[in-house]
Image: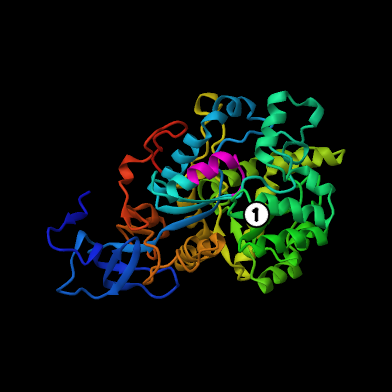
Amino acid sequence: MSLLAVSGMAAAADILITDVTVIDGTGAAPMSGRTVAIEDGRIIRIGRARDDEDADTVIDGSGLYLLPGFIDSNVHLTVYGNARRRETVVRYGPRNEELALESAQRHLAHGVTTVRDSYGDLQSLLAVRDRIEAGEATGARMLVAGNIVGWGGPFSITFSLLPEDELTHFQQTWNDRITQGVGEELMDMGPEGVREAINAYLDKGVDFIKYGGSGHFRRPVLIGFSPRVQEVIVEETHERGKIAETHATSQESLRLAVEAGIDLIQHPEILSADYPDDLIELIVEEDVLCAMRPNMLTGRIWSEHLERREAALAAQSEMPPPATGAQENRRAEARGDDLELQRRNARRLIAAGCPVTIATDNYQGDAPELRGEPKPLEQEAGMGSLLAIEGLVELGMTPMEALMAATRNGARAAGMADEIGAIEEGMIADLVLLGSNPLDDIANVHDIEAVIAKGRVIDIDSLPEQRIFSVEAPALSR
């Protein structure tokens, strides 16, 4: 890599990044002309250049910008299936470890040094997580949850509205592989039964717990667990020092989860109605992290939505009034009312001061040979994360606030705020070096010159090492 110059002198550090502008992730003003020294995977000094300082690897940071590695708080690294992706999981489920590693490497190549997988094939995820952590494989740091507690797996009523008596033997066994003993049966249990099940699940080695505060969908709207059971889930998770979060799609299911003491809401913008003011106030008061999908509410997606909405409104103006509620639902779908609602909710949460982190919900989807149309770039590993950072600015944040959402707040979501998410002495050296200033134009987050993960310079041009689902990304057009 042209940025690197290997020194032949005795090393006081493993890596020196010299004369660089540091944007440290805390919200402090950029610091220009700094030297950052890294040793044994951690930042040991940030300051002015010293004549007696040298290292094995010296990176000339002149004209460059150093940021903490980005953190995506909601990804899906494995194939898990659903009502529409049956064939993919049959073909590729046995290769989930390879797929998870490919996705973790694609994230890392885009400067995303930590990802949180909130739903997927736990056995494969744990295996790849541990290989990366041990240094046996290259990839973004992985934190994994496995199943969404209380849901019955990808081929179930709660996830895909599929009745059990219509499932094949493969789908039944795959549901069991995904749920790992914390499926729909927990919704039939009282507090003590759930307490036992949650602890048995935590013993499997998951990094955090995500539970179904509601079902998967906004229609019909369901409440997943009673208030006292939700309190048990959160209490037992916190007892292990781990983050508790929820997927909840209605006002009351979300309110119950916030009152139970959750740390994070996944995609809080996806609600069945506009937020009542008091619920937003409660989220702010409790300092609950809002893990948003701005990649799916902004940029190209929003522009194309506005065009489709205008055409739908014009067509519907010539129609008679809908005769049934189902007809009105179909017309609302054609108008994109749900996307309008999500964007309103996201903007209101941001304006109210809710702590936000990026959580793209990016996924593997159908195998490339089975796709009827290309997967949206906004949901590709790594690229979607960068587009999410851009999207936060479109939704009302300043560039600095958007960067903090993807770094400092992401570290909170990971339960690692003392280790990652900022450029400070003693922190793990997860870093991204940009060729242009993201505070001038947030789109400059794409201008990646180098990535450092746990104090190691990554050969980003070589990632992913094996291509299974990934294809060369098309040129970005915004």
- 404 is higher (above) or lower (below) than 112: below
Q: Nearer the viewer, residue 170 or 18?
A: 170
Q: How is the image coloured?
A: rainbow
Q: Residue at x 51, y 32 (%)?
A: 374
Residue 146 in percent (x, y) is at 62, 45
Q: Residue at x 44, y 34 (%)?
A: 470
Q: How many marks?
A: 1
Residue 250 visible in the snapshot: no
Q: Is 121 colored magenta in this rendering?
A: yes
Residue 225 in percent (x, y) is at 80, 54
Residue 155 in percent (x, y) is at 71, 33
Q: Nearer the viewer, residue 2 or 169?
A: 169
- 310 is higher (above) or lower (below) than 30: above
Q: Amino acid at mark 1?
A: Ile
Q: Nearer the viewer, residue 423 or 277?
A: 423
Quick one: label 1, few (<14), some, or many (20+) residues within 10 Å?
many
Q: Is 392 colored magenta in this rendering?
A: no
User: Based on the displayed image, in which of its 4 quarters is residue 336 positioned?
Assistant: top right
Residue 287 in percent (x, y) is at 64, 70
Instruction: Decide whether the magenta segment is chiefly helix, strand or loop.
Output: helix
* Magenta-highlighted residues: 118-129
Q: Mark 1 = which residue?
A: 209
Left or right of 263 on screen, residue 453: left
Name, please, the residue furthest toward the right.
323
Residue at disc 1, secondary structure: strand
Residue 391 visible in the snapshot: yes
Left or right of 202 on screen, residue 43: left
